[in-house]
Amino acid sequence: MATFAPDTVKHLWKTCLTPKDAKTLDSEWDKNVATRVTAWKTKDTPGSDVQLIWEAHVVEYVTRIHSKTTAHGNAKGLNATPPPLPNTIPIFGPRFKPPTYLDQYKRKGQVLVIPETLFLKPLVIVHPFYYPNADLEKCPRCGSSNTSWTDGGWTGAGPRHVHGERVEERAMGYQLRCKACKANGTKPFCFALTNKDFWQNWEPSQIPRGIPIFLSRAAVSRQLFNLIIELRPTSTAAGLAENIKQLHLLETTQRILEYLVHLKAAKSSLFSKPALQDYVDLDTSITSDLISDIYELFSTRIRQSESSQYLRSLSAKCISTDATFRSGKKATVVEK
């Protein structure tokens, strides 16, 4: 999976613009990123400044690439066909991987050795651009197709935390606005793709591949969800939670080692003498209670209906038996 480097993406984007528009791309792009980060901080969106800025770059890229492949709202006939994306613009996502030390070294010749670079979390974008045939346009409440993505926009609360198999992740979603619910005065009429209410009528197996499983308390990646439903029958929830925690600790240790290797190399350089920095990741791996909730969700929404349907398909001879028994001569009832 290629990493998402904002400077590289902006450079590639300029190749499909006119010289006049290419000159203003950097200023417009950076202005939108700064505005979005400020709005997220106002709503106390968790995450470091480096994490939020990189995620804002991802959102700006998806916004532009979606606009580039969307027909005008008033277009009719052949003009209503979405235009193709130019070959000069690469398609990243829906899971975006942050840049690493390797990207800095190969493109700039030197590395800014800070631990935040290694501990940036991947971002999963839940957007209709990546799922054109997933039938996401129906309202999850009333089932109406009189909906709009344009009026919904991105979720104002910012990215959401997602438990992962080896690393913690984040998810950012678009919003679907139901015009029928709004006209009837039904609330809510705006549903975020990162909210469990949007997926309440979907079985986990029907959710498009790559989209996390969203619960009321948290969210889990599809890889971790599959791991839980496969291993939970042969393990306890606490034991499985401990195994996942060990995977996270292993990944963290490997990243710390990578940081120390690059720090040692940078100290031997003539250009910079970076100091050793501490970094504390406050995000914790999945808990045993959440694992139990996930397996209960899987059992009630998938396994029960499958078992019931399978039992109805079986054919057999029914033998009626009398399960009653006589109590005579088995006990003596006396009165004192």
Image: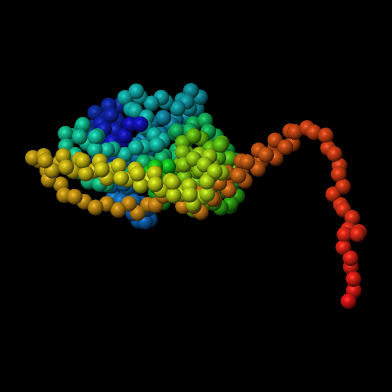
Q: Work out which residue is located at the far left of the displayed protein and give it.
A: 270
Q: Where residue 2 sits: x, y (%)? A: 33, 31
Say which residue appears at 24% left-offset and 34% top-offset: 103
* Image height of 284 relative to 110, above or below: below
Q: Where residue 85 sits: x, y (%)? A: 38, 26
Colour pattern = rainbow
Say which residue appears at 27% left-offset and 38% top-offset: 100
Can residue 270 be seen from the camera position used here? Answer: yes
Q: Where residue 236 sits: x, y (%)? A: 52, 49
Left or right of 88? Residue 260 is left
Can residue 200 be seen from the camera position used here? Answer: no
Say which residue appears at 30% left-offset and 51% top-offset: 48
* Image height of 89 relative to 232, above or below: above
Q: In which quarter of the image is the N terminus?
A: top left
335, 150: nearer the viewer: 335
Q: Work out which residue is located at the far right of the displayed protein and give it.
A: 328
126, 164: nearer the viewer: 164
Left or right of 87? Residue 27 is left
252, 12: nearer the viewer: 252
127, 69: nearer the viewer: 127
Say which residue appears at 19% left-offset and 50% top-offset: 276
Q: In which quarter of the image is residue 112?
A: top left
